Each structure stands twice: as C-alpha cells, then as structure tokens.
C-alpha cells in the first residue's frame, strides 16, 4: 500500500523509496539545477575553508604551554582558548541551514571566512588571555557554519553518482587536518612563535575568499527561499545545552566530574536544555533546526554512526601523542611525525573509495572500513614500553585507510535520501554530532586514562611485599646498581623510588592498553547498525536514485 508524503513530494512504500535526484527541484515540474562552474573548481574553494577550520581546532593544542607562559597564566586557564572555540563552533553548526536561507549560502560562506580570518589576526595579536579567548569565540562563530556549508555545497554540485568522490574530497580536510594539526603546531611553535599558528590563516583565508567569489553560486531554491522568523528561543536553548555540555566534557576530569558542583550543574543544564530543545524544535513552525529530517532512516542511522566514529577518531588522536610523549619521552614534534602517517593512509583511501563507491555497495565498503578500524585500534592496544616507531606507524596507516572507507560511504548513505534544499540543515546536524562525539571521546579517554592508571597501580602495589620474590629481586638489583654511587643507605631509599616510578609507568601503560581496546570494542559494536542502512542505487541513465532495502 502506497501513501503520498506531501513534504517529500514522492510516493513512499515500505519496500522502496524513490525520490527526485539531487533534487534541485523545489516542486512538481521544476528543472534539475546544475552549477555553471566545474564542480571540481567549487570543491577546491570549499575544501580550503574546511581544512582551515578543522586544522585550527587542533593546531593550538601543542602550543598551550607557550600561550600560558606568554600570558602569565596557567595551562588550565589557557585551555579555555580551546574550549571557547569549540563551544562557539558547536552552537553555530546546527543553525547553518536557517542562516543560509536568510543570507544566501554564498554570502554566508564569504562572511564566515572573513570573520574567521579577521579573528585569526586578533588571536595572533592578543596581549592578554581574556582578549585571546574573546577572539577565539568570534573565530569559532565564524568557523562553525563553514563545515556544513562546504559539505552541502559539494553534495549539491556533484550529481548523485559522483557524490562519493565529492565526500572523498571533503573527507581529506576532516580526517587529515586533525593529524597534521599537532605536528604543524609543534613545528611552528618551536621554530617561530605560537602567534604564527593563527597568522597562517591569513593567506588561506584570502585565497578562499577569491575562489568562493569566483566559483560559487546559490541554487534557485536558496535564492528564492524565505526563511521564517528567527526562532530565538530555540537558538538560546541550543546555545545553553551545547555550551554546557562542551564545557562539562572539557573540564570534567580536571574538576573530578560529579564531585564538582559546577560540573553537576553544567550536566543538568545540558540534559534539561537538550530535552526542551528537542520538544520545542519538533513542534515549532519555523525551527532553527529542522529535526523532522531525522525521520529519514539513512540519515538518522548515519548520524548515530558518525557520532561514534567521531569519538573513536578524536579519542585515539588524543591518546597516542600522550602515550608517545609521557611514556616514551618523544618531543611534541617527533610524536606528531609518528602519528602523521594516519593522514597518508586517509589520503590513499579517499582516492580509492571515490572510485569504488560507484562500483561496490557502500555498505560493503563500510563493513570493511569498520573491521579495519577495529583491528588497527586493537593493534595499538598491544603497545609496550620497548616498541619501535614502526609499531605505531603501521597501525596508524591502517587507521587512516579505514577512516577513508568509513567517512565517504557513510556520509553518502546518510545524505542519499535527502533533497538538495535539505542538505544545509542535514549537514549542520551531522557535523554537530560528529563534534559532540569527538568531545565525548576525548573526555572518556582522558578520564579512563587517569582512573585506569590508579586502578592498575593499586593492583600492582599490592604485590610489592617482602614475601614477593620477583619484587625483592628487582629491588635488590636496583639497590646494588645505585650503591657504588650513593652508598648503601641512600641506595636503599632510592631503590624504592625507582621501583615506584617503574610501577607507575607500567600502570599508565595498562591504562592506555585498556583505552585502545575499548575504542576497538566501540567500533565493533557499530557494525550491526550497518544493517539498517538502505542501499543507494544510481541507475546509469536514470534521473532518480532508488533506495531499496
């Protein structure tokens, strides 16, 4: 039995759903829209903006001690330069669709790039921490809309059969930039000044403005769109719950989570705000975020999966440099270079999957990607304190390959059922959930690293007794080695300190192992959800993609 969905303008059945392709169509009889400019020129324009924003969200991390020192602040206070940027960006992300229909997508993207670039100049010139934080908030507000707009523009500019290639291009910025960021930030900070990590955005921003003005154009449904009145209440509630959640996740471990009244209050505000936001936006006549788009099964499943992928990606990206620097003694630059081969793997995968996605069922590519990600993450869970750099490099290359085979088909499947005029709203929600997943992943990993190290240390110390023969042998060996230098009495005292340090390092190592294996388990648990995705079928001569179970 078929029923007509007036919102989609199509006939929907339980077995298959057909929708107007790529639908620049905004009503019956409308003509499909295609950009006048070559889509690859459009891709080059929006790719710059995506890369700039994602790079700037990670490049600051390694410069925090330098920023804190020059501003006469603690490292904990300097972390607000990260938190403020991420919170501001997260608030704008889901409102991108409404802003695009209000200003026009091209003008909005131009405005965002200009604001982001000018704010970068202000960040580099900041003489106080307060001024830097305000500049970072403005930078985040400018950068928040750039990712979803870029993704929406790419999806609209390429025909349905080539959207996998478009997402491969977009994925280069999203996946590779977080890998390059720490390495680039460490090199610039060590050789020049932390201020140049912001100044490098100036030439990139100017180039992006030139390319956007030359190649981008708004489709007819954007030029003729008439957004409803501003949903001010929805926007305020969105800012409250997203901001509260990000601050709580960022400061939770530092403040000992629910032991802190501040963190408890922030989490309560986030929970209440989220519930109110969902209820209000679902029933509002002109919502700032159209949540009805989640009725699309592919989009809702894809959004859930990208949230977990964000947690795994950002969680592992946060863990590995910590392991290399704290346990193996790598410098920030050396650890960044050791991790950077993940970007090489992603680069190779993006080119491969862009070609394969038109030939192979995207769900098969996703299965392969999730299996490879689970294996590579588990391989990082077999680290020890005597590993060679190659033991880290090869799992990272495989991780990069797997992310390419996940990101492209997942995004294509999630957006494959949607009309073009729904893309901006959808990409805003999609990117917000990926960022929230990343924030949850980082918070979960840092908390479990600290707590896990304490648990393992407690277990290991319980075996440090006079009745444990291996412990006594190790203690005597250390004491014998120190005695010629310090004397018997001091050597006995120092031996306990040396052995305690070894126990602490080993306990921390086991905490890293547990975390990597948890990320691998999270990846495996995603795989059953792939069965819920409908297959996209792009017929060679058809104008409509059909989606069948």
Image (spheres, rainbow, N blue to C red):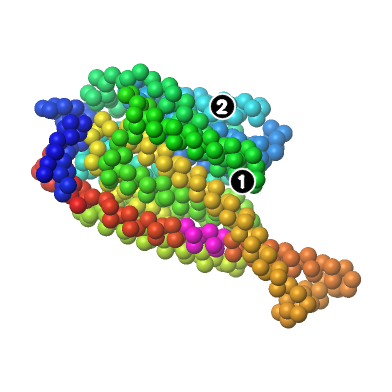
Is residue 468 rendered to the left or right of residue 247?
A: right
Residue 74 lies, with reference to residue 484, above or below; the image says above
Instruction: State the image coordinates of residue 546 (x, y, percent, origin top left).
Output: 16, 45
Is residue 154 rendered to the left or right of residue 337?
A: left
Q: Is residue 514 highlighted in magenta?
A: yes
Which of these two is toward me, 208 or 528? 528
- On the question of residue 142 being in view, the answer is no
Q: What's the magenta region?
A: 512-519
- Counting labels gives 2
Crowdedness near tag 1: few (<14), some (14–19) or many (≥20) residues, C-alpha within 10 Å: some
- On the question of residue 478 being in view, the answer is yes
Secondary structure of residue under mark 1: helix
Instruction: State the image coordinates of residue 248 (x, y, percent, origin top left).
Output: 57, 40
Crowdedness near tag 2: few (<14), some (14–19) or many (≥20) residues, C-alpha within 10 Å: many
Residue 229 lies, with reference to residue 140, above or below; the image says above
Secondary structure of residue under mark 2: helix
The residue lying at 50 percent from left, 24 percent from top is 118
The residue lying at 47 percent from left, 29 percent from top is 237
Instruction: State the image coordinates of residue 542 (x, y, percent, origin top left).
Output: 11, 42
Q: Is residue 508 highlighted in magenta?
A: no
Is residue 34 rendered to the left or right of residue 44?
A: left
Residue 483 lies, with reference to residue 86, above or below; the image says below
Residue 249 sits in quarter: top right
Main SS class of the magenta portion in the image: helix
Residue 385 lies, with reference to residue 434, above or below; the image says below
Q: Reading the chain from its start, which is encountered first: label 2 or label 1?
A: 2
What is the number of the mark on residue 135? 2
The residue lying at 42 percent from left, 63 percent from top is 375
The residue lying at 22 percent from left, 23 percent from top is 220
Which of these two is toward me, 294 or 64? 294
Mark nearer the viewer, 2 or 1: 1
What is the number of the mark on residue 257? 1
């Amino acid at each position: 039995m078929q029923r007509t969905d007036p919102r989609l303008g199509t006939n929907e059945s339980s077995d298959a759903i057909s929708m107007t392709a790529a639908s620049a169509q905004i009503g019956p009889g409308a003509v499909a829209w295609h950009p006048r400019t070559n889509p690859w020129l459009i891709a080059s324009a929006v790719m710059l903006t995506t890369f700039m924003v994602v790079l700037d969200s990670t490049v600051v991390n390694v410069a925090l001690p330098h920023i804190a020192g020059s501003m006469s602040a603690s490292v904990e206070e300097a972390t607000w330069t990260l938190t403020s940027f991420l919170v501001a960006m997260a608030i704008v992300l889901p409102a991108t669709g409404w802003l695009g229909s209000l200003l026009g997508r091209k003008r909005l993207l131009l405005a965002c790039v200009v604001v982001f670039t000018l704010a970068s100049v202000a960040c580099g010139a900041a003489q106080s921490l307060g001024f830097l934080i305000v500049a970072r908030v403005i930078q985040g507000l400018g950068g928040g809309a750039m990712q979803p707009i870029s993704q929406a523009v790419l999806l609209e500019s390429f025909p349905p059969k080539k959207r996998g290639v478009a997402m491969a291009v977009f994925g280069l910025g999203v996946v590779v930039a977080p890998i390059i960021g720490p390495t680039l930030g460490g090199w610039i900070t060590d050789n020049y000044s932390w201020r140049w990590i912001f100044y490098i955005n100036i030439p990139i921003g100017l180039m992006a403005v030139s390319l956007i003005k030359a190649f981008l154009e708004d489709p007819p449904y954007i030029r003729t769109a008439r957004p409803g009145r501003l949903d001010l209440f929805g926007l305020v509630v969105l800012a409250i719950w997203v901001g509260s959640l990000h601050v709580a996740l960022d400061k939770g471990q530092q403040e000992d989570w629910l032991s802190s009244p501040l963190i408890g209050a922030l989490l309560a505000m986030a929970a209440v705000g989220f519930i109110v936001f969902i209820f209000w936006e679902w029933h509002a006549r002109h919502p700032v975020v159209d949540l009805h788009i989640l009725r699309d099964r592919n989009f809702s499943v894809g959004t859930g999966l990208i949230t977990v992928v964000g947690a795994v990606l950002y969680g592992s990206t946060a863990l590995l440099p910590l392991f290399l620097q704290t346990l193996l003694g790598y410098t920030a630059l050396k650890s960044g270079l050791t991790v950077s081969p993940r970007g090489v793997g992603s680069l190779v995968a993006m080119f491969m999957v862009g070609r394969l996605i038109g030939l192979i069922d995207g769900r098969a590519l996703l299965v392969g990607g999730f299996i490879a990600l689970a294996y590579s993450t588990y391989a990082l869970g077999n680290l020890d304190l005597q590993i060679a750099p190659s033991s880290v490099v090869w799992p990272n290359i495989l991780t990069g390959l797997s992310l390419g085979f996940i990101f492209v088909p997942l995004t294509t499947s999630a957006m494959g059922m949607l009309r073009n005029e729904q893309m901006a709203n959808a990409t805003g929600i999609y990117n917000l959930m990926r960022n929230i997943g990343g924030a949850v992943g980082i918070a979960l990993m840092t908390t479990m690293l600290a707590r896990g190290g304490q648990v393992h240390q407690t277990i290991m110390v319980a075996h440090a007794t006079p009745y444990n023969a291996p412990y006594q042998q190790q203690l005597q060996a250390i004491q014998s080695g120190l005695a010629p230098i310090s004397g018997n009495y001091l050597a006995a005292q120092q031996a306990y300190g040396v052995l305690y340090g070894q126990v602490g390092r080993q306990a921390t190592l086991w905490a890293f192992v547990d975390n990597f294996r948890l990320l691998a388990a999270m990846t495996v648990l995603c795989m059953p959800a792939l069965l819920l995705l409908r297959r996209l079928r792009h017929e060679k001569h058809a104008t409509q993609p059909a989606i069948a179970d």
